[in-house]
Image (cartoon, grey):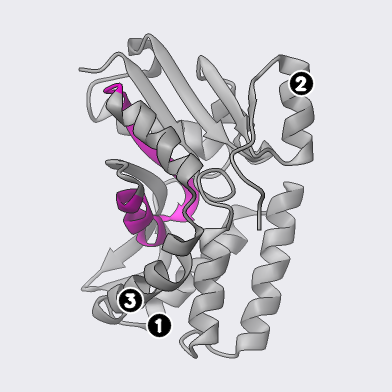
């Protein structure tokens, strides 16, 4: 078993885009999400709240997961393949790919930890070569997504809860690792940043950049954000 753990946020950390927001925009642009203008306006409102740290996760989950309930899993998989080709892969930067590769080559246990739902982020993790994924889990019953969340959303303190649950399934805790890393851009991730031995403010928003200075955390600017 590896003695090191590397955790990565996704949106604006490994990618210069927000995969949740761009997924919804992608669906709306192709006529797969209802009225495009209403969808874009709500999407923008939620992202503004997220950036400000005032987002209520229940509101976001209801909006984001609701689109999964509109289509069959087969169609959703087809849409996502197109989304990866048109949106995600062009946004992948060598700097982020190399960062992940460095940890993988060192034999570190690597996991993507995002507030975005796992349907959206699992293929993105595979594209980076990250073998484990923690995201908000969309409920799945009778062969369809219900539009509801299953378990604890991986947002703010929920990320710590979900990481601990994931490790517990392997009979591990954070204390079992000699070194633990977490890379994130957002002040929403401070709870998880504070419990690892190597917190790295990555492409940080101004509040997190300032907090990193105060706490002496390293700051890593991988790329300009979009």
Lower position in the chain sequence, tag 3 or tag 2 = 3
Q: Nearer the viewer, mark 1 or mark 2?
A: 2
> 185 or 160, which is in the foreground?
185
- On residue 213, the disc is 2
For label 1, the SS is: helix
The part of the image, by quadrant, that contains residue 200 is top right
Q: Is residue 196 above or below residue 111?
A: above
Residue 168 makes an appearance in the image: yes
Label 1 Cα crowd, 10 Å radius (few <14 / some 14-19 / many 20+): some
Residue on which disc 3 sits: 76
Label 3 Cα crowd, 10 Å radius (few <14 / some 14-19 / many 20+): some
Residue 156 is situated, as x and y percent measured from the top left of the image, at 59, 39
Lower position in the chain sequence, tag 1 or tag 3 = 1
In the image: residue 141, left or right of residue 100:
left
- On residue 70, the disc is 1
Q: Is residue 25 above or below residue 187?
A: below
What are the residue bounds of the magenta stretch? Answer: 106-127
Residue 100 is situated, as x and y percent measured from the top left of the image, at 40, 36
In the image: residue 13, left or right of residue 149:
right
Q: Nearer the viewer, mark 1 or mark 3?
A: 3
The Cα–Cα distance between marks 3 and 2, rounded to whole angstroms, is 42 Å
Q: Going 26% across and 68% down the picture, which residue do you hit?
A: 141
Q: Going 49% across and 90% down the picture, which residue do you hit?
A: 31
Lower position in the chain sequence, tag 1 or tag 2 = 1
Q: Is residue 73 above or below residue 217?
A: below
Residue 163 is situated, as x and y percent measured from the top left of the image, at 40, 32
Q: Going 29% across and 73% down the picture, which residue do you hit?
A: 77
């Amino acid at each position: 078993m590896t003695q090191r753990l590397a955790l990565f946020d996704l949106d604006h950390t490994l990618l210069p885009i927000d995969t949740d927001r761009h997924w919804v925009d992608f669906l709306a642009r192709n006529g797969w999400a209802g009225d495009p203008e209403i969808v874009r306006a709500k999407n923008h409102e939620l992202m503004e709240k997220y950036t400000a740290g005032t987002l209520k996760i229940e509101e976001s989950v209801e909006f984001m997961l609701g689109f999964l309930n509109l289509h069959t899993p087969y169609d959703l998989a087809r849409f996502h393949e197109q989304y990866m080709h048109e949106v995600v892969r062009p946004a992948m930067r060598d700097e982020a790919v190399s960062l992940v590769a460095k940890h993988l080559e060192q034999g570190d246990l690597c996991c993507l930890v995002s507030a975005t739902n796992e349907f959206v982020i699992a293929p993105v993790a595979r594209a980076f070569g990250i073998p484990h994924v923690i995201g908000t889990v969309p409920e799945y019953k009778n062969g369809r997504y219900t539009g509801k969340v299953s378990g604890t959303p991986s947002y703010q303190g929920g990320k710590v809860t979900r990481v601990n649950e994931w490790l517990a399934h392997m009979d591990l805790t954070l204390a079992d690792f000699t070194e633990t890393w977490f890379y994130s851009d957002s002040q929403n991730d401070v709870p998880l940043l504070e419990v690892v031995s190597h917190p790295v403010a990555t492409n940080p928003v101004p509040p997190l950049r300032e907090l990193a200075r105060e706490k002496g955390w390293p700051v890593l600017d991988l790329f300009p954000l979009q």
